[in-house]
């Protein structure tokens, strides 16, 4: 094959690769921005009062979708922090949600999780408050 | 020439794939915070006492948590009504009593008062209630 015939395709290849890399970089930047947006786009909250040793309660978790499109929540989990020095997080246990919860754009839905306190919860857990962190996973259907 | 065309096609495909705005999956993480609050224990009630020979029967009102739910057990404490010293609670009312009455058996001669302390689970204790009227156990 004559060398001259390769010049045009090679040039085209270089140009396209340049465009591709530019696009990839822009997309990568967008994804970084998306990541911070995503963190605020699906927000969970919930609280419950009235736990006591051996008691079981219901924790209603509100899942708020701030995006302009529908989301399908597939998982919601909860972790607790120690309430105080004498009242450790192991004193409480939580159920978790696994399934399909459709949350319309800019709307909220809720899931109910089981919450319980161990019979062995120490006296320091009286009137204690456990701070919770919610985590959810959703997909755009 | 065929080789050049193949290279061109591959570059186009690569460019489209990388530059596509839809690249990457739309899995969305969600986060948030909340709280779970535990109840406070209710205080103990004042027991009624009746004496029959050396047996003292106590009855008391159920302790309830604010917002609902009853405590699961109670601790009975006997005091010497004269000195105020705590005595060892005897069989029938010793330990945690999972009822609203108990009969302490073989109580020695003397004048005694009793208190009720609500309990929940293995460790929770409420505030001790006020002392009962004196129970007089004769010889």
Image: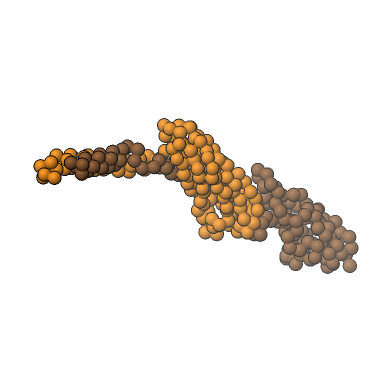
Chain colours: A orange, B brown
Give whichever of B27, A7 is nearer the camera: A7
Q: Quadrant of the C terminus of chain B?
A: bottom right
- Residue B5 % position (x, y): 21, 40
Q: Nearer the viewer, residue B45 or B4?
A: B4
Q: Which residue is painted at 76% across and 49% down in the image?
A: B61
The reply, left or right, for residue A38 in relation to residue B78 is left
Residue B137 occupies quadrant: bottom right
- Is residue A54 shown left or right of residue A85? right
Residue plotted at (73% across, 56% down): B74
Residue depicted at 50% across the width and 43% down the height: A74
Residue A91 seen in render: yes
Rendered-image quadrant of the N terminus of chain B: top left
Which image quarter: residue A47? top right
Question: Residue B100: x and y, percent?
Answer: 78, 53
Residue A62 is at least partly visible in this image = no
> From what the image shows, is residue B111 above or below residue B47?
below
Q: Is residue A66 above or below residue B104?
A: above
Q: Nearer the viewer, residue B9 or A130?
A: B9
In the shown orientation, is residue A118 left or right of residue A12? right
């Amino acid at each position: 094959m004559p060398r001259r015939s390769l010049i045009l395709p090679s040039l085209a290849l270089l140009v396209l690769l340049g465009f591709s890399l530019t696009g990839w970089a822009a997309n990568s930047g967008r994804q970084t921005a998306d990541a911070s947006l995503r963190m605020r786009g699906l927000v969970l909250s919930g609280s419950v009062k009235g736990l006591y040793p051996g008691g079981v309660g219901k924790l209603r978790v509100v899942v708020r979708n701030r995006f302009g499109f529908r989301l399908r929540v597939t998982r919601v989990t909860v972790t607790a922090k120690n309430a105080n020095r004498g009242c450790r997080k192991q004193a409480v246990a939580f159920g978790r949600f696994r399934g399909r919860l459709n949350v319309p754009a800019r709307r909220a839905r809720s899931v109910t999780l089981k919450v319980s306190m161990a019979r062995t919860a120490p006296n320091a857990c009286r009137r204690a408050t456990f701070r919770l962190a919610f985590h959810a996973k959703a997909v755009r259907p | 020439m065929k080789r050049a065309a193949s290279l061109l096609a591959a570059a186009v495909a690569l460019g489209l794939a990388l530059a596509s705005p839809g690249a990457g999956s739309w899995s969305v993480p969600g986060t948030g915070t909340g709280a779970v609050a535990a109840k406070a224990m209710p205080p103990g009630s004042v027991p009624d006492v009746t004496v029959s020979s050396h047996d003292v029967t106590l009855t008391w009102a159920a302790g309830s948590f604010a917002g609902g739910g009853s405590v699961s057990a109670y601790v009975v404490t006997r005091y010497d009504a004269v000195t105020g010293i705590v005595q060892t609670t005897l069989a029938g009312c010793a330990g945690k009593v999972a009822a609203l009455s108990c009969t302490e058996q073989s109580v020695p001669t003397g004048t005694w008062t009793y208190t009720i302390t609500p309990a929940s689970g293995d460790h929770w204790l409420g505030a001790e209630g006020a002392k009962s009227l004196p129970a007089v156990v004769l010889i």
